[in-house]
Image (cartoon, coloured by chain):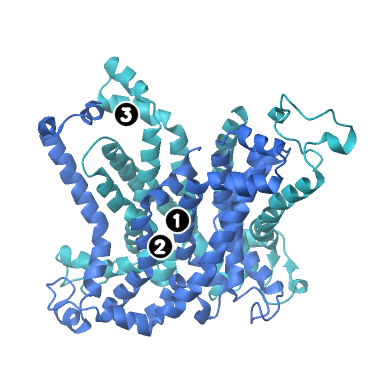
Chain colours: A blue, B cyan
Amino acid sequence: MTATLERPSVPAVKKRTVTPARVALHTFLILTCLMTLAPLLWAVYASLRTYEDTSVNGYFSIAKSLTLENFAKAWDIGDLPHFYWNTFLITVPALIITLLLSSMVAFGVSRFSFKFNLLLLMIFTAGNLLPQQVIVTPLWRLYRLIEVPEWISDSGSLIDSPIGVVLIHIAFQSGFCTFVLSNYMKTIPYELTEAARVDGASVFRQYWQLTLPLCRPVLAALATLEFTWIYNDFLWALVLIQDGDKMPVTSALQNLKGTFFTDNNLIAAGSLLVALPTLVVFFVLQRQFVGGLTLGSTKG
Amino acid sequence: MTALQEKPKAVAPQGPPPRRRGKRATALAGTDKLVLGLMLGIPTIVHLLFVWIPTLGSVALSFSRWNGIGGFEDIEWIGVSNYVEIFTEYPRFWPAVQHNLIWLAFLLIVPTCAGLLLAVLLDREIKFSRIYQSALYMPMVLSLALIGFIWQLIYTPDGGLLNSLLGLSDKPVDWIGDSDINLYAVLVAAAWRHTGYIMLLYLAGLKGVDPSLKEAASLDGASATQTFFLVTFPVMKPVNIVVAVVTVIEALRAFDIVYVINKGRNGLELLSVLVTDNIIGEASRIGRGSAVAVILLTISLGVIIPYLYQTFSKENRS
């Protein structure tokens, strides 16, 4: 309780707060944070060392020299640009369409009252909580069944096609987004859309020009969150894409493992390169990321 | 669609002129109805088609014998034989159940306690709180597949960090290869990521606790510990439920990390692996895989339904 009172105090008074308990608290927190960061820092350290160095001296040693060579090698051997592009082709459309579709449902259920409003919301919310393995077998079969023209997918079906992966991301992720967005939209005063309606605005305009702009903060939060989730997806791509060449970068790591079997330094560099986009998003948009997760857990 | 009507408030005081009965009695014009129908209909169809229809598909296929390659005419309906076989004969099933249960227990104990403790410590005005939070959240953005790769650098018997730190370089422990301990090694890595999430949930929960409650408790002479366990923690019941749901689902979903490490074998069998093995692994028994999926579904519904109930019954009241 006293801690809340300390905030407005002037710096001179702050000195009093340096108690042994405070020091212990900060020491504990610093150690915990270092332990949390350690695995990643260790990977960075390993990635900067040469294979010759670590194979002679072991990993637990002072580096003879540091080099970025492993990153260049992983980039080339792992053909990372190609796999990044595959990921891009999946993540961007999936992200945009998920937000679009879920905001439509959220708008519908939060601004109008139907008999089946609650049911609809429950279906979406429950859907997002299912373990993927519950769905995956019939989905895999369904995808082989759905025929699409060859200019969309050269396999002739949704299997082995980025579109198939995009579709399941949309279907699966729209559960969470609908839940969060509908909670948020319920906090927007009804009078706003009502006024627009009286002025003759169509339902679509109430959605597109009125409600969506008001949802910008939550859309930004969801976009950040969904980007990392879709980017990090491993299972859908692993099952639904059989041609290793079409894998997104996260699942393609699996291919890298075979290639770099013994060279852990190279694996470390490759892993870090794959992690990079999500780490950048996290450090730049941390507020949105945390906000999105918080919104998902508490009622808006 | 006939049930369509706007919230009661929609009848504005200065309301439109009296309407004729029939079609005009609904508040929405024809095109608006159509637009709204499409806005709700298309996403719902997509969601049902790719999420719930396959879920029902798993249930149906769990009563069949099928290799999944041939046409539907090859499906042989065999009743509950798959379940009987799974429970009595399938050698990988019970180990997988056990591993999933250990996974769940571990996640419920270690990251939950650690996350709660860290949230309590950070939920006050301390310096550098934001920096601490950033560091602790960071593992959350990494995929479990990637975490599998990164942690192998720590666990590897040839020169890995852990063996070196423990001074075991001469007689290295194979943390990943030894089927007695690899599950726990993997769990530490999974918990590493899960802790930040739990902390985030509890931090949000703690912010939502009415400070006057804590004040009242301390006025009544409760110690800080008493206040926390008797007042704050019970008040956070909704967050506790979310934490429980998230953790159970996470434990059931666990797959990527073990698949990356050794494809879920040799001590790392999980129910999720038994399902996917039928489509991307060696086994090709769609029926048996689906039956395992249905078991997963049943367990997850055990937490999903109470969660829905608690979330949406509140909704109805408000």
Quarter of the image with the N terminus of chain A is top left
Decide if residue B293 is in sight here. Answer: no
Q: Nearer the viewer, residue B31 or B203?
A: B31
Q: Which amino acid, mark 1?
A: Thr
As measured in the structure, the alpha-carbon distance from the residue carrying label 3 to the one carrying label 2 is 33 Å
The image shows residue A235 at horizontal and vertical percentages of 51, 66
Residue that label 3 marks: B228
Q: Residues within 10 Å of mark 1 (few under 14, many from 20)?
A: many
* Corner quadrant of residue B279: bottom right
Q: Nearer the viewer, residue B165 or A120?
A: A120
The image shows residue B146 at horizontal and vertical percentages of 38, 67
Q: Residues within 10 Å of mark 2 (few under 14, many from 20)?
A: many
As measured in the structure, the alpha-carbon distance from the residue carrying label 2 to the one carrying label 1 is 18 Å
Residue that label 1 marks: A224
Asked whether the residues under marks 2 and 1 belong to the same chain, the reply is no
Residue that label 2 marks: B144
Q: Are marks 3 and 2 in contact (CB under 8 Å)?
A: no
* Corner quadrant of residue B259: bottom left
Q: Residue at x 46, y 72 (%)?
A: A251
Q: Nearer the viewer, residue B121 or B262?
A: B121
Subunit that carries the residue with mark 1: A
Decide if residue A15 is in sight here. Answer: yes
Asked whether the residues under marks 3 and 2 belong to the same chain, the reply is yes
